[in-house]
Amino acid sequence: MLRDITIGQYFPGDSIIHRLDPRFKIVMTILYIVMLFTGDNYICLGVGAVYTFGAILLSRIPLKMFLRSVKPLLPFLIITAAINLMFMNSGDVLWQWKFIKITDGGLNTSVFMVIRIVLLIMGSSLLTYTTSPITLTDAIERLLSPLRKIKFPVHELAMMMSIALRFIPTLIEETDKIMSAQKARGAEIDTGSFTTRAKNLISILVPLFISAFRRADELATAMECRCYHGGEGRTRLRQLRSAPRDYTALAVTVLFLAAVIVLGRLF
């Protein structure tokens, strides 16, 4: 399961999505999230699905990578579906047992919410899949640069977000190694009762925290050795420049958002 977590990973490529300005990609991701949560019917959700799979096709990243990003969240999706199924009692009753009642309204809401969350995960993953952490840091810093006038630590915030994204795959890999090592020593992590497995997690969490603090200390030492002192006076190897394709992509996103708003009012 840990190997299926792809949050924070970057897949190098030369597609049109990879070449877009990261500042525009962040803005389009925000508009995409608004698009998914603005529409409240399947027609609007279909428009969002067309936009999602169109962007995935243009990114030239295999669809299975996006499906892998959804797989670790299956328990959350199941719980969400079950809650909506049991607590939404609108419409005709399809099945009832004691206090549990399943209606067609609850079933419809459950399916709708699961599809919406899946699209949200797949579409949002496209940002980190097609943007390197360094470029993403520069984009966040440029977008938040007006906040410097009120003494907001823009560069430090962008750096923290970039480091967090960068170390997610590293910590996942480290967790997988620790679990394999503990299993080789006879630890029962995947078997036994829930209480037993929860206690056995201590043998994973303790070395994982130690490893995370050690990596953080090594990173801080490396940054100090390279005379890092924050964003003041910092130069960049690659300058962010917008191109006509960026404005075209933003215009297409706005059109899809407008279509969702109009269709949501009509239906």
Image: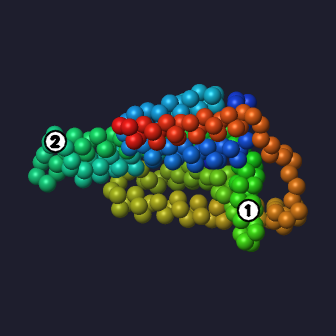
Rounded to the nearest angstrom, the CA distance separating label 1 from label 2 is 53 Å
Estimate how packed mark 1 is, as few (under 14), some (14 to 19) or many (20 or more) residues with alpha carbons within 10 Å: few
* Residue under the image location 56 percent in, 46 percent down: 31
Disc 2 is placed on an element classified as: loop
Task: Identify the residue position indicated by label 1 in the image.
Answer: 146
Mark 1 or mark 2, whichever is nearer to me:
1
Foreground residue among 238 and 203: 238
Where is residue 246? Give x, y as percent. 71, 37
Residue found 33% across the figure and 40% down from its top: 111
Q: Is residue 198 shown to the viewer in this render?
A: yes
Relative depth, front residue between 92 and 63: 92
Q: Please identify the residue farthest to the left as the structure is shown.
A: 98
Q: Please state which amino acid type lies under the numbered disc 1.
A: Pro
Q: Is residue 2 visible?
A: no
Residue 12 appears at what percent x and percent y? Answer: 71, 35
Which residue: 33% across, 56% down?
193
Q: Secondary structure at mark 1?
A: helix
Q: Who is closer to the viewer here, 225 or 55?
A: 55
Determine whether 209 is above or below 50 in the image.
below
Q: Earlier in the sequence, mark 1 or mark 2?
A: 2
As shown in the figure, which amino acid type bears the numbered disc 2? Asp
Percent x, y of residue 253 = 59, 38
Residue to which mark 2 is pinned: 92
Location of residue 130 in the rendering, given as x and y in whole percent from the top left corner: 67, 39
